[in-house]
Amino acid sequence: MASTIPAAQAASQPSFVKLEPSSSVWDRITTWASEHKAAVYTIAGVTLVATGAGIYYYTSESAPTPQDLEAAAEKKRARKENKKAKKNAQREQKSPSPETKSQDKPQAASVQSEDDVPDVTESTVASLSDETKKDYAAKLKAAGNKAYGSKDYNRAIELYGQALLCKADPVFYSNRAACWNAMSNWERVIEDTTAAVNLDPEYVKALNRRAHAYEQTNKYSEALLDYTASCIIDAFRNTQAAEAVERLLKKVAEQKAKAIMEKKQRRLPSATFITNYLQSFRDRQLSDTISEGADLAENSGKWWLRKGLLAMDKKMGEGYNEAAEAFEKAIEAGDLGENEALAYNMRGTFKYLRGEADAIDDLNKSIELDATLTQSYVKRASMHLEAGRRDEAAKDFEDAIAQNDKDPDVFYHRAQLNFILGDFPEAAKDYQKSIDLDPGFIFSHIQLGVTQYKMGSVASSMATFRRCMKNFEKVPDVYNYYGELLLDQQKFQEAIEKFETAVQMEQKERVTGMNVLPLINKALALFQWKQDFSAAQELCEKALIIDPECDIAVATMAQLLLQQGKVPEALEYFEKAAELSRTEAEIVNALSYAEATRTQLEVQEKYPQLASKLQGMPASAAMR
Ligand SMILES: *[C@@H]1O[C@H](CO)[C@@H](O)[C@H](O)[C@H]1NC(C)=O
């Protein structure tokens, strides 16, 4: 299934899709610091579709949907910037801009010739009167600016140094830093800007300059801290600094994610995630050779394979771990006969779920053994997609269709691909084709409804869902996803009713393994509608008791805490979300939230005078 949990987000933002982490981080920070609306934020970066398509969603840069969204976010941002630009024009002129530009050039060079420039040394300065020192400082600075303007940096450095002897002015330090900057002497830039910031902690230009130098010397965390502070001081008016925050968040997160991936123990994602992925394939009959357990020799390959398939049907974390192990054993034991391709398929599937890179080898082997097992092509396609190899994914679908053009699974999954790529008309066609081949598979219907909604055909989408409720009255997922669409239309009451129905049905219908998505959706709806944090939090906690590994629940919790200004608690949950992530891209995503949160905490500690600017904002907004 390709729909995501609708984010507790601005109504203008599309639901059912994952936003680029960077843009949502931006939106969130911006919102947090400059607007006081608790409801305007997005959780989307960390929600995911816990399903087959959910896996595709983490296809990093290659999938255009997130890119489109980023472009949209960019536009929105640009609009915002434009509006602010006018307001800030005056301020901008006064306040130093990040890079060397105009303000550093001699503005009103009162010094016409070198003759007018005083010459000051440490020993002569002591004998000067305060009045003279002030006068000299101004003249030396002007001369320094002039030298800087004509790119005579060594002379400018000397002049600013003399000016500093007369007066410890943060501007002189910052200007001298600009010279070091032009000469790529980063250590000196850091020294001088630090001196400037010590004299004037809210000196935005010096902070930006130091951040730039930190970035040049690969001190990403330090750079991030400075840029974040500068953004907050400047109320997010400076696009360059804001972009730098995003860039560095990504760099820091990527660096840390690499370290985590190296140490990470491979393990399966949450049961919710696995169930949703596996149920996107139709159940298959066990082949005759393994259908009767009693006939199989214990610990034989076929015995393990049968055991794995049965364990998988429990739809619970424990069962999935058991299944993963059994499929490994089945391959080790061998002698699988006609089931060998299936065994490789299943082992590869669980390796994939654990995020192991060699999973694709098993699928290759499976296809080699039995090209008619079209499911292997489909699964390999999802691996290609996740790694950004779109063309190879498309090729796998073609090959699968060449093998069997009556396989509804293949069309369903190709539809998912098109859905993710944003080609909704193609997606709708394939969903329909899949339905024509097998109308009994509920998820094609649900997805078709979601796709119609995305295409703007709200009426036909609603009609599709009403038909689903009639024809599949006992399937909780129908109510869950219908609820999402209602939530997106801000029909809160109705949406919540649907989620509640889904929860009740989950409890009643599923013997094992409850899907927690409706619980989380209800939490988001209550939050969006009534800002009811405690009810929302309670629901997330409930979801986490049922499925402790559920990263969506963890991430939702983090966002709820953040909205209440409980920053340290939010940070804990963001870090937990990173731990629970499956792939490096997911970890980067979760970590960029964690890092953004951590940096804001650090800014508050390091710049107590700014803390008052930040603190209480989300909380007080929530109280209103
Ligand atoms: C598996 O098959 C894909 C084609 O889908 C190919 O690109 C890849 O190199 C193969 N991997 C191995 C290890 O043979």
Image (cartoon, grey):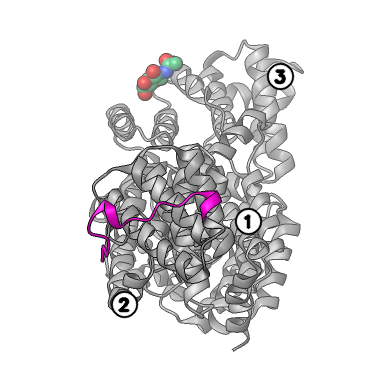
List the residue tagged with mark 2: 90
Report how far apart the C-alphas of labels 3 and 2 lie in the structure.
Answer: 83 Å
Q: Report the span colored magenta.
A: 108-124
Q: With respect to residue 25, does 465 lie above or below?
A: below
User: What residue did someone put label 1 on?
Assistant: 598
Inspect this view and state whether residue 370 appears.
Answer: no
- Residue 532 percent location from the top left of the image: 64, 81
**Depth check, front residue: 229 or 335:** 229
Residue count near mark 1 (Cα–Cα under 10 Å), binned few <14, some 14–19, many ≥20: many
Which residue matches tag 3?
296
Q: Is residue 159 above or below residue 409?
A: below
User: In the image, what residue type sits under mark 3?
Assistant: Leu
Q: Secondary structure at mark 1?
A: helix
Q: In this orientation, does residue 153 appear?
A: yes
Is residue 251 inside the magenta stretch? no
Upstream in sequence: badge 3 or badge 1: 3
Can you tell which quarter of the image residue 538 is in?
Answer: bottom right
**What residue is rendered at 69% in x and 52% in y?**
513
Q: Around disc 3, counting alpha carbons within 10 Å, would you say few (fewer than 14), some (14 to 19), or many (20 or more)?
A: some
Q: Measure the C-alpha gap from mark 3 to mark 1.
A: 56 Å
Which secondary structure dominates the residues rendered in magenta?
loop
Residue 302: x %, y % from top left? 65, 19
> Which residue ends up furthest to the top in the rendered image?
335
> Do callouts 3 and 1 mark residues in contact (Cβ within 8 Å)?
no
Which residue type does callout 1 highlight? Arg
Residue at 55 percent across and 20 percent down: it is 339
Is the residue at mark 2 in contact range of ligand 1, meaning its CB lies under 8 Å from it? no
Q: Mark 2 and mark 1 in contact? Answer it, CB < 8 Å.
A: no
